[in-house]
């Protein structure tokens, strides 16, 4: 090997190592950004907070729940003889299981809400399989927060989530098997969950870096607490109306110790004009749909 | 020629057809991932076969049976059959069934990626083609068939049959891709639906022209006219099933679970497709057996290769 060839070889190896190192550091950055507790940015937020609350309405007549045929697994029929679909739960015109979250926004002072680091809750969120049905049907977690998955049924299930940015995962959980703890490294709204043993079983998980999310209760109400004062884009997501569900978006302003009210409407009779925003008297008027 | 070997080859071909139906039931019920492990189900040889595990584990059990039958067939051929090329075909069938098992495991472990699932469904048809061919080659009608005169001045039937067979195979690949590209609760991709409809048109023309030519040119020769007639009848049934399967799949995303009409019709469509393929294989092989190659082809074959 000539001297010139050796020099070129050493140069090529050095460049390759440099490129490899750069790729590795980029990869770890991506993971950190997708994770919950970024050490860079503005650090944790400490200051006054307000809340965003509202009611999710359903306008029009919702489709009647459909009966599930559980003959393929007698344990399901025994545990839940009147099992029906739970994609649209409407009580007195109010819609349950709507995932409401802050998509993006600017905290007073000019920093983006995502620039702050938001600590991961130490407690796990529960996802139970009971009566051949996921409970809760819709849930929210922060990135890297544990989800404690249990099987309370006298039959076997499998939990199969199908995210787009997080890794897909499928795990059998026979009856009597210990709880499974899992988490998501990246924020993603929304992740469908299904049981391939019982194809009617579906759940949805919203994963965010921030703790600013809520799921509407049976009476349609939701509340997002401890929101720093600022201007935010709030999104309400509900299952149905297509593979990706339906969303409504609203611009909301939160003031210190204030309570912003953001109501959303879904359903056949609802239009974008039905999505209205009301302010509590002490609050400033928010800018609508910038 | 062994009668017992032929009967056993027919049994393996029938078991393979049954296996294709079992596989189609897995897809239509969305049961492919009913258990996360492979080859065991929930860590057991015999799990409680409830819910969709009935279909997935049932498919695995039938596949294992077909695998054992294929090994037995290969041994049977080695012992009874003097024609070495049939022994080699038996070995090919054995390799195909092993590869099919590996593909089945891969598609479960990789969580049903479209290329692997489609390859699994495609290899199933190729394996079926091999077992049907073995049944044809070991039959008495194959060894005792007499050579017929081929018409002159027209397109040779063996070419027409081959063209129809290739068209059907490509249509089966398209169908497998379409079926695995969307689950029962998702809408089928329209571009693939249109391609499959185009494929159906191509199969109708290719198989229609071939069968009518067989019936016209070799009236009374049941060795050829029987598979041609059956293929035509199956094609009509298959077209009807295709339209019905599409209509039931259009509504399935709004259903709470895969319902029996959709499952029944889509599985019947897969099964009938396999039967059209099998009948065309029989017709093609028989055409090659009894109809001489065209003079031009014979001349070409006799001509020394130019270097």
Image (cartoon, coloured by chain):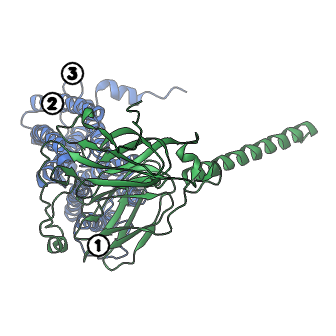
Q: Along the polypeptide, which appears first: circle 2 or circle 3?
A: 3
The x and y percentages for residue A165 are: 47, 48
Q: Which chain is green?
A: A
Q: Chain of mark 3?
A: B
Position above or below: B237 against A148: above
Please give the residue where the numbered disc 2 appears in the rendered image: B208
Q: Where, quadrant-wise, is the C terminus of chain B in this rendering?
A: top right
Q: Mark 2 vs mark 3: give the one in front.
A: 2
The answer to whether residue B1 of the structure is visible from this angle is: no
- The mark found on residue A164 in the picture is none
Q: How crowded is the residue under tag 1: few (<14 C-alpha within 10 Å), some, or many (20+)?
A: many
Q: Is residue A81 visible?
A: yes
Q: Name the residue tied to disc 3.
A: B154
Q: Which residue matches tag 1?
A: A156
Q: Residue furthest bottom?
A: A176
Q: Residue furthest front?
A: A282
Q: Which chain is disc 2 placed on?
A: B
Instruction: Measure the C-alpha gap from mark 3 to mark 1.
Output: 63 Å
Q: In the depicted view, which residue is nearer to us: A284 or B222?
A: A284
Where residue B56 sits, quadrant-wise, is: bottom left
The mark closer to the camera, 1 or 2, is 1
Residue found at x 65% / y 46%? A26
- Determine the colour of chain B: blue
């Amino acid at each position: 090997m000539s001297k010139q060839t050796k020099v070129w070889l050493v140069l090529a190896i050095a460049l390759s190592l440099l490129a490899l190192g750069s790729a590795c550091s980029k990869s770890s950055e991506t993971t950190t950004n997708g994770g919950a507790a970024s050490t860079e940015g503005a650090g944790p937020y400490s200051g006054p907070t307000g809340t965003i609350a509202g009611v999710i309405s359903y306008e029009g007549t919702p489709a009647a729940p459909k009966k599930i045929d559980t003959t393929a697994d007698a344990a399901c029929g025994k545990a839940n003889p009147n099992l029906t679909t739970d994609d649209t739960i409407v009580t007195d015109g109010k819609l349950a299981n709507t995932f409401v979250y802050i998509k993006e926004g600017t905290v007073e002072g000019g920093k983006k809400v995502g620039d702050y680091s938001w600590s991961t809750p130490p407690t796990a969120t529960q996802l139970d399989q009971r009566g051949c049905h996921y409970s809760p049907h819709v849930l929210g977690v922060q990135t890297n927060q544990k989800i404690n998955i249990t099987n309370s049924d006298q039959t076997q299930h499998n939990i199969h989530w199908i995210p787009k940015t997080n890794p897909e995962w499928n795990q059998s959980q026979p009856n009597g098997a210990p709880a499974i703890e899992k988490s998501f490294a990246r924020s993603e709204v929304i992740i469908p969950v299904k049981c391939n043993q019982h194809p009617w079983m579906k759940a949805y998980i919203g994963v965010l870096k921030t703790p600013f999310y809520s799921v509407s209760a049976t009476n349609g109400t939701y509340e997002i607490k401890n929101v720093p004062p600022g201007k935010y884009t709030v999104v309400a997501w509900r299952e149905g109306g297509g593979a990706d569900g339906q969303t409504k978006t609203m611009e909301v302003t939160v003031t210190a110790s204030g309570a912003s009210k953001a109501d959303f409407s879904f359903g056949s009779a609802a239009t974008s004009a039905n999505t209205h925003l009301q302010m509590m008297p002490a609050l400033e008027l928010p800018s609508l749909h910038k | 020629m062994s009668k017992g070997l032929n009967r056993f080859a027919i049994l393996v071909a029938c078991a393979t057809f049954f296996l294709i139906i079992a596989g189609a039931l897995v897809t239509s019920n969305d049961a492919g991932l009913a258990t996360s492990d492979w080859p065991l189900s929930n860590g057991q040889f015999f799990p409680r076969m409830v819910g969709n595990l009935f279909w997935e584990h049932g498919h695995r059990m039938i596949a294992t049976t077909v695998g054992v039958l294929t090994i037995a067939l290969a041994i049977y051929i080695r012992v009874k059959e003097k024609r070495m090329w049939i022994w080699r075909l038996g070995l090919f069938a054995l390799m195909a069934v092993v590869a099919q098992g590996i593909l089945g495991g891969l598609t479960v472990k990789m969580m049903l990626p479209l290329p692997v699932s489609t390859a699994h469904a495609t290899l199933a048809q190729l394996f079926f083609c091999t077992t049907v061919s073995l049944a044809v080659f070991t039959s008495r009608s194959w060894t005792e068939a007499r050579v017929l005169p081929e018409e002159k001045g027209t397109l040779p039937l063996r070419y027409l049959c081959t063209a129809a067979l290739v068209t059907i195979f490509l249509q089966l690949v398209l169908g497998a891709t379409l079926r695995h590209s969307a689950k029962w609760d998702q809408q089928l991709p329209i571009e693939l639906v249109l391609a499959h409809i185009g494929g159906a048109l191509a199969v109708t023309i290719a198989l229609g022209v071939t069968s009518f030519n067989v019936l016209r040119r070799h009236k009374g020769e049941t060795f050829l006219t029987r598979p041609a007639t059956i293929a035509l009848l199956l094609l009509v049934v298959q077209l009807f099933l295709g339209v019905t399967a599409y209509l039931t799949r259009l509504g399935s995303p709004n259903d709470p679970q895969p319902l029996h009409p959709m499952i029944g019709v889509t599985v019947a469509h897969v099964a009938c497709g396999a039967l059209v393929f099998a009948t065309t294989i029989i017709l093609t092989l028989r055409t090659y057996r009894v109809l001489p190659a065209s003079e031009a082809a014979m001349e070409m074959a006799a001509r020394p290769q130019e270097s």
